[in-house]
Every structure is written in C-alpha cells, then in structure tokens.
Image: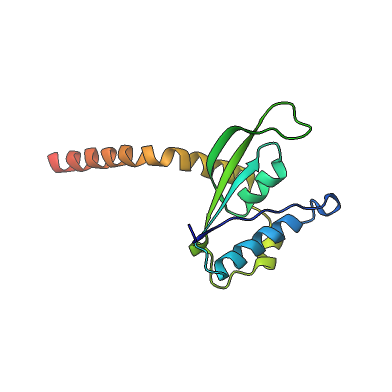
Amino acid sequence: CAHVCNGGFITKKNFRKQGAGRLMGASFLRLARDLGYKLSYFNLVFASNPDSVRLWDGLGFTRVAVLPRAANLKGIQNPVTAYGYHYDLTTLPLNFDAPRYAAQKPFDRRLIEVRRVYERVAPSLLPACMCVALALLFAVIKK
C-alpha cells in the first residue's frame, strides 16, 4: 500500500466558502502525485458535512464506499454515514496547476450525480449492451 496516500483537512470557520478547502485539496493532489503516490483514498468523509462531500465530488474524486452508521459525532444524535473517496493520481496531468484548478468552478452537482449513478450501473450495462449488439449482428447476418 505504499503507493496509496491519505490526507485530512480542516478549514477554520472564517475561511469557509472562500475556496480554501478547494485549494488545499487541489494542492494535495499535485503534491501526492509529485511524491510518487499513485492513488489517494479518503476514508471518512461524513455525510453530515455536505460541504466536504461537495469538495471531494467537485475535485473529481470518485465515491467508492458507503459506511452506514460509521461514527458518533458530537452534536448529532444518530450515528453518521461516512463515504470513502478515491482518486487515481496517474490521471492527473503532468502540468496540473493546483491554484488555477482550485479557482475554477467545481463540477455541476447534477453531473456528479449522473456520474455516481453511471458508476453504480455501468458494470451491469456492459453485458446488456453486448447482448443488444450481438442480437443486432445476428439480425444483420440473418438477412
């Protein structure tokens, strides 16, 4: 697992909603890649923190795990769900400019949700698409 890295960020309240988290996240991607890591995994992104969820979604991380009732957090009555997020650092462009990337508008939430649904159903779509393609091929051959 020496090629997998993890990080954690806390943004002081008076710096929230100003892009500080996005800058830290984008800088983390560049630094982790430049240090030779191939993958990044954030294992406890709490569903009760929608800003954090938006941050990792918006930076292009892929949600790969859902941990129901993962933690009891102060001020929240019931156990909170946590998400695991993955980023393949080998896909990061060599000239990746973290400050410039952080300044860009994050992904549209609707596109993030479409991507999440696609990732969930894509493995089952491939066999279905292959069946349709084969059926069309046989129909063409049969004529």
The image's colouring method is: rainbow
Q: Residue furthest bottom?
A: 95
Please determine whether, in this image, residue 47 is positioned above or below residue 27.
above
Q: Quadrant of the C terminus?
A: top left
Left or right: residue 15 compared with residue 122: right
Q: Is residue 136 visible?
A: yes
- On the image, which quarter does residue 132 sit in? top left
Residue shown at 62% from the left, 38% from the top: 82
Residue shown at 61% from the left, 67% from the top: 31
Left or right: residue 55 compared with residue 139: right
Left or right: residue 16 compared with residue 87: right
Nearest the camera: 70 or 25? 70
Q: Residue furthest left?
A: 142
x and y percentages locating residue 68 in the rendered image: 58, 31
x and y percentages locating residue 114 in the rendered image: 54, 42
Q: Residue furthest front?
A: 2
Left or right: residue 71 compared with residue 35: right
Nearest the camera: 35 or 96? 35
x and y percentages locating residue 2 in the rendered image: 49, 61
Nearest the camera: 21 or 37? 37
Q: Residue furthest right?
A: 14
Residue shown at 58% from the left, 64% from the top: 32
Residue shown at 82% from the left, 52% from the top: 12
x and y percentages locating residue 46 in the rendered image: 66, 40
Instruction: Give the total number of marks visible in the rendering.
Output: 0
Please determine whether, in this image, residue 74 is positioned above or below residue 88.
above
Q: Is residue 104 visible?
A: no
- On the image, which quarter does residue 140 sit in? top left
